[in-house]
Image (cartoon, rainbow, N blue to C red):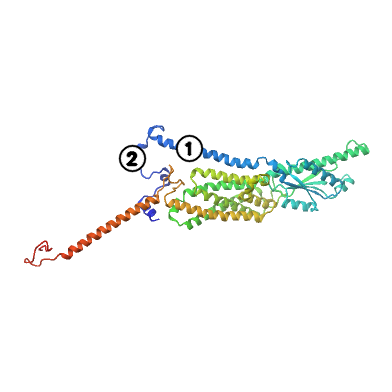
Amino acid sequence: MSNIVKFMKANRVMTYCELFEGVVERSEEDFNRLKYNSILAPALRPMLNARILYYLRIFCIGILMIWTPLCLFFGAVHKRSNHVYRLHLDLVDLDHGPVGRNLTQHILENGRSSAQTAPRWRVRTDLHTLEETRTWIRLNGWGAVVINSGASQRLSETSAAYDPRSAVTVVANTGRNPIAGLTYTQPALSAAARSATLAFNAAVVKQQQMESGIPDGPVAVYFRTIDAAPMAFNIAPVQPLFAFLVSTLCTVGALISWKMTTFGFFLRVRHRHMWAALLALVMLWTLLISMHCALAVSFFRGPHYNHNALPYTVGRFFSIWATTWAVLLAVGLWLLSWYLMITPEFLGLLSVITVLSNVVSTLVPVQMTNRYYRWFYALPFYNGAMLYRFILSGCYPRLGLNIGVLLGEIAAMAVVLGLSAWARQACVRRGLSDVPGWYRGNMFFHSPVPLQQDADEDEDEQHHWRLFRTCHRSGSRRRQNDAASTLSIADSINDSTSLKEGNLGV
């Protein structure tokens, strides 16, 4: 540390522009040497060749940046229809009559014929009312087809006021996952209910023709659809995805700038204070960004946007704010921990992989992916989106699991940030890393701090020189004292004036 202080005192303060360009002082001769008329000048060829090789390296990193996240995304959605059978739809017969038996049998037979390319059906006997079924679907399920109680009796007592749609109710859950809901579960529910009711109506019409000779008859049964966990509008299930994505992109620029502007602090500030300052900075930034995100949701969602959705209260506003803050804090600490240690050429690769993997975990249902992608359950976006959808629609509550994962990630990333700050400070103070993060040996490296080994050698040389001067001064002083002890003053002209005896005859 003393070497760094002495060096900084001995050298003038350099601007960041000078640090990036690697220039401290340039004489007029240096500037004249750099004035070439062509980029192909012979004196520039070594520099040009080095830059071309480096740009080829950047090109390879760019290819890796394209293939890695895209393979991650396409691999998660590839052949997802082969895993649709992992989703389960419920079939509830509350009628216990001819209508219920016929519709149940038809839906199960069609489900068995397409078992690998459609969600599986399971008959539930523990649900006894439509409201109970709706609550269970909101909390745990993907959707259900309910044959309402008394459907057979109402059909046998057909009157002018009979409503065929009162026979079957489709209970959907739009708040759980956008891809699975809009692509698989809701179409499967509607197709099963439509197919079963049409088949039943055709059988009723045929029977009427045989009994009474009537060529056509009224519709016997049909279905209506209700939403167990509405989120007010169709794109609402992807609302947390865009909220987290935009907030994270706003945070990435700030994190990179903090890496570039903390070089001087790493030279002068203690490690624990630097760690606390970076942690507080990330917490404050993400808190403000998440507040604006929650305000934007409040502005567009509104307390009375849709009467089918849950009311947007003050408590839900603060819940969304806290959820967004936790997600951004976990992602921000993770990115900053890596930003402090990696070189600038890898900043984009790390950012793209981190952001896109979180986006895929929010958008694609993990149940419909290969087992390799089970680590999506641990990503901040996934847990934040599940909390977000529960806050807005009340569906699939797993509060303890989601909150626990987020808090655990925040604590772990805070520790990792401390280790990264310690490593960054060690490299900076030893002259191994410069302002943008290049390491010694790179063509762009330029640090105002000398290498620790060179500084130690200079310190040793200075120490030996100081010892030599001290010994020299001590020897000179000792000889002067010896000479002074043999000198005497002549008090008279008769005294001896011999130089050998030291009398100068003064």
Q: Disc 2 and disc 1: Cα gap in Å? A: 31 Å
Label located before the other in sequence (2 or 1): 2
* Residue position for label 2: 28
* Residue position for label 1: 55
Q: Residues within 10 Å of mark 2 (few under 14, many from 20)?
A: few
Q: Nearer the viewer, mark 2 or mark 1?
A: 1
Q: Secondary structure at mark 2?
A: helix
Residue at x-position 76% and y-position 51%:
134
> Is residue 217 at all visible to an observer of this figure?
no
Q: Secondary structure at mark 1?
A: helix
Q: Give x and y (percent) for residue 24.
A: 37, 45
Q: Which mark is residue 77?
A: none
Name the image quarter holding residue 481: bottom left
Q: Give x and y (percent) for residue 430.
A: 42, 51
Q: Give x and y (percent) for residue 497.
A: 9, 63
Q: Amino acid at mark 1?
A: Tyr
Q: Nearer the viewer, residue 462 or 227?
A: 462
